[in-house]
Image: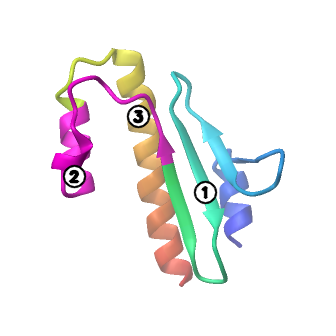
Amino acid sequence: MLINVLRSMGFRRSDDGDYWFKDYGNNVMLKVASQGLNEVEIELDMPMPTGINLQSLSNPEEVIKSIINSPITKDILQSLLHALSDLMSLRMIISMIN
């Protein structure tokens, strides 16, 4: 069922078949991999703006707030917005499936 959801959202399977991914442009990509029957790993790949120390941030909300407040281009911010929207949708769908 998750595979059908990923396909409908525009995700493609990687060449080696290890994960599904969606490219949002500007080096922003969302990857989804199944680690087991009820385990799904979602990874957001993006260029990190300079001046952000990830070790000092304790939760995802602080990371997102730091990225949004950093000097990044409108195009990267728009790609990130689309990726985060899909990420939240996926988390909600996965919760409903389980």
Check disc 2: other Cα within 10 Å, few if <14, some if 14-19, many if 20+.
Answer: few
Q: CA distance from mark 3 to mark 2?
A: 14 Å
**Disc 2 to disc 1: CB gap under 8 Å:** no
Specify few, some or many for label 3: CA neighbours under 10 Å numbering under 14, 14-19, or 20 or more: many
- Specify few, some or many for label 1: CA neighbours under 10 Å numbering under 14, 14-19, or 20 or more: many
Spot occupied by residue 82 in the image (x, y as percentages of width and height): 45, 37
Q: Determine the image quadrant of residue 53.
A: top left
Picture residue at 16% right of the left edge, 47% below the top: 56
- Give residue 8's position: percent from left, percent from top: 69, 53
What's drawn in magenta, residue-wise? 44-67
For the residue marked with disc 1, what is the amino acid? Val
Residue 27 lies in the magenta stretch: no
List the residue tagged with mark 3: 80
The tag earlier along the polypeptide, 3 or 1, is 1
Q: Position of residue 33 (x, y in %)?
A: 64, 61
SS type, badge 3: helix
Residue 11 placed where, x, y %? 68, 47
Residue 61 disc label: 2
| Element assignment for label 1 | strand
Task: Please tell me which residue lies in front, 90 or 18.
Answer: 18
Q: Quadrant of the N terminus?
A: bottom right
Q: Which mark is residue 32?
A: 1
Check if mark 3's residue and mark 1's residue have beta carbons within 8 Å. Answer: no
As measured in the structure, the alpha-carbon distance from the residue carrying label 2 to the one carrying label 1 is: 20 Å
**Image-based side of 47 in relation to 33, left or right:** left
- Amino acid type at circle 2 is Glu
Among the 4 quarters of the image, the one containing residue 97 = bottom right
Viewer-nearest residue: 65 or 9: 65
Identify the amino acid type marked 3: Leu
In this rendering, position of residue 48 left or right of residue 53? right
